[in-house]
Image: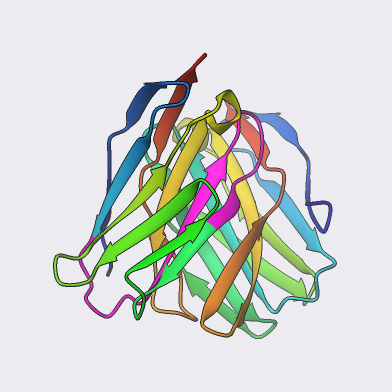
Amino acid sequence: DADVTQTPRNRITKTGKRIMLECSQTKGHDRMYWYRQDPGLGLRLIYYSFDVKDINKGEISDGYSVSRQAQAKFSLSLESAIPNQTALYFCATSDVGQGQETQYFGPGTRLLVL
Amino acid sequence: GENVEQHPSTLSVQEGDSAVIKCTYSDSASNYFPWYKQELGKRPQLIIDIRSNVGEKKDQRIAVTLNKTAKHFSLHITETQPEDSAVYFCAASIIGNQFYFGTGTSLTVIP
């Protein structure tokens, strides 16, 4: 879905470095999410935001922070990267209506922490 | 919070056979249950969903069933085709709140 984009798509960094993953969307959705995907663990929620002034921790927020710069932009930061943060990271947006909510995922950012 | 368990973690079927993936949830307040398909190297995409006031929903070869009493829901794929090979994720939520995803099922359809 070209409406949700993530940069970078791949990143290699070293332990202790600060990095930022960026997500942009043109869908006009208020809700945005950051997930990480690990083999055998599925999609785990890191942070989510229901509007520009709303930020909520997910189940695995330790070691991460986020910034919602605008309705269209939601960034994820790793203040001091560690090897067990090596994972595939997905941003998603969603729209709720008529008893249904579809989450639209970005293409993912593959992060390797050495 | 909600806990979603998904089984099996891997599933292989012959082309043309049916595949069934099962999920259980813990929070009886959950009322929305979507299923996402993730093809290799791609992003997850919604394929079907069901609300708690419905017991079954079909869309061509895929169907989802929900048993609220037992707190479980299942994805059924009939007449499987090679293009059905993917990882499938179930999720549960209280509509308007965060999703809780299962750990995924890797489905392989053998031609």
Residue A66 is situated, as x and y percent measured from the top left of the image, at: 62, 64
Badge count? 0
Whether residue A109 is visible, yes or no, is yes
Give the magenta range.
B25-47
Residue B8, quarter of the rendered image: top left
Residue B28 lies within the magenta run: yes
Above or below, comparing residue A52 to residue A66 in the picture = below
Residue A59, quarter of the rendered image: bottom left
Whether residue A114 is visible, yes or no, is no
Farthest residue toward the top?
B111
**Colour convention of the picture:** rainbow
Residue B73 lies within the magenta run: no
Between residues A69 and B5, which one lies in front from this camera angle?
B5
* Residue A19 located left or right of residue A72: left
Residue B31 is situated, as x and y percent measured from the top left of the image, at: 35, 77
* Residue B7 located left or right of residue B105: left
Above or below, comparing residue A110 to residue B35 in the picture = above
